[in-house]
């Protein structure tokens, strides 16, 4: 299992805009229509990565805990589906349903969105404030497949809590780690 760290987009960066197909309902959705009132968590995932499979339950729970507090979640898969057919859109839809994702799971066919966000791995997280300025980029928590540390979402949860309570988000952020995005 190859380990790739996230690139850590500079804090304060404006969220790159996008319009992508939501694999759950096959409609086009834009960042502008999906953004949350208090914040937006954009994360790059895929179906087959063991690092993502390890945290799927926490991703579903994050959305359930924070959408009602004005923080929307948006998942994006940018993997090359020719060489990684398990990440095809119809299987993304199945994955979203199986894992009870209540957030959109978007397909970045051209990989332009992943490049605009400087995403490097799955999972890769970007938390933006209500003005779509980056306040957190880093890991979900310290858990990794096989390391015995429970999945808690502590890194993201602390950042979201600070954001919605108008506190400063800790700028000491650890990179996420996972499988490298499968570029074409």
Image (cartoon, rainbow, N blue to C red):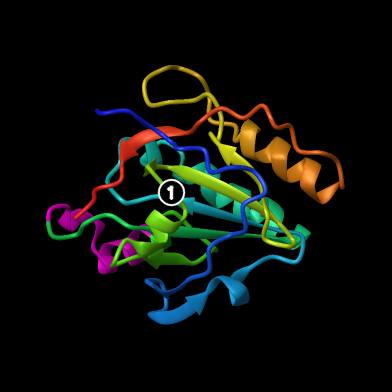
Please check the rendered image and state whether residue 88 is part of the magenta-colored stretch, yes or no.
yes
Q: Dot 1 lies on which element? A: loop
Task: Please provide percent x and percent y for residue 40.
Answer: 64, 58
* Residue 17 sits above or below residue 53 on the image: below
Front position in the image: 148 or 134: 134
Residue bearing the label numbered 1? 118
Please check the rendered image and state whether residue 182 is part of the magenta-colored stretch, yes or no.
no
Q: In which quarter of the image is the C terminus?
A: bottom left
Report if residue 26 is visible in the image: yes
Q: Quadrant of the N terminus?
A: top left
Front position in the image: 108 or 99: 108
Residue found at x 87% / y 47%: 166
Query: In this rendering, would 123 be left or right of 62?
Result: left
Query: In this rendering, would 98 be left or right of 36?
Result: left
Residue found at x 75% / y 66%: 37
Residue found at x 36% / y 63%: 112
Task: Please provide percent x and percent y for residue 60.
Answer: 54, 51
* Residue 70 sits above or below residue 57 on the image: below
* Residue 79 sits above or below residue 31 on the image: above
Magenta extent:
83-95
Residue found at x 25% / y 57%: 87
Query: In this rendering, would 54 be left or right of 165?
Result: left
């Amino acid at each position: 299992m190859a380990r790739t760290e996230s690139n850590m987009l500079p804090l304060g960066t404006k969220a790159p805009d996008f319009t992508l197909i939501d694999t759950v309902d096959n409609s086009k959705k834009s960042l502008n229509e999906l953004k949350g009132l208090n914040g937006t968590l954009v994360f790059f995932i895929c179906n087959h990565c063991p690092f993502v499979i390890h945290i799927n339950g926490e991703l579903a729970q994050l959305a359930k805990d924070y959408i009602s507090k004005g923080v929307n979640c948006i998942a994006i898969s940018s993997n090359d589906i020719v060489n990684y057919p398990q990440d095809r859109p119809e299987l993304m839809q199945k994955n979203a349903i199986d894992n009870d994702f209540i957030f959109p799971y978007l397909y970045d066919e051209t990989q332009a969105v992943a490049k605009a966000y400087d995403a490097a791995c799955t999972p890769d997280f970007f938390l933006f404030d209500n003005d779509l300025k980056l306040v957190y980029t880093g890991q979900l928590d310290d858990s990794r497949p096989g390391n015995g540390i429970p999945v808690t979402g502590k890194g993201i949860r602390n950042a979201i809590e600070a954001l919605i309570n108008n506190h400063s988000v800790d700028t000491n952020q650890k990179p996420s780690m996972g499988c490298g995005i499968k570029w074409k």
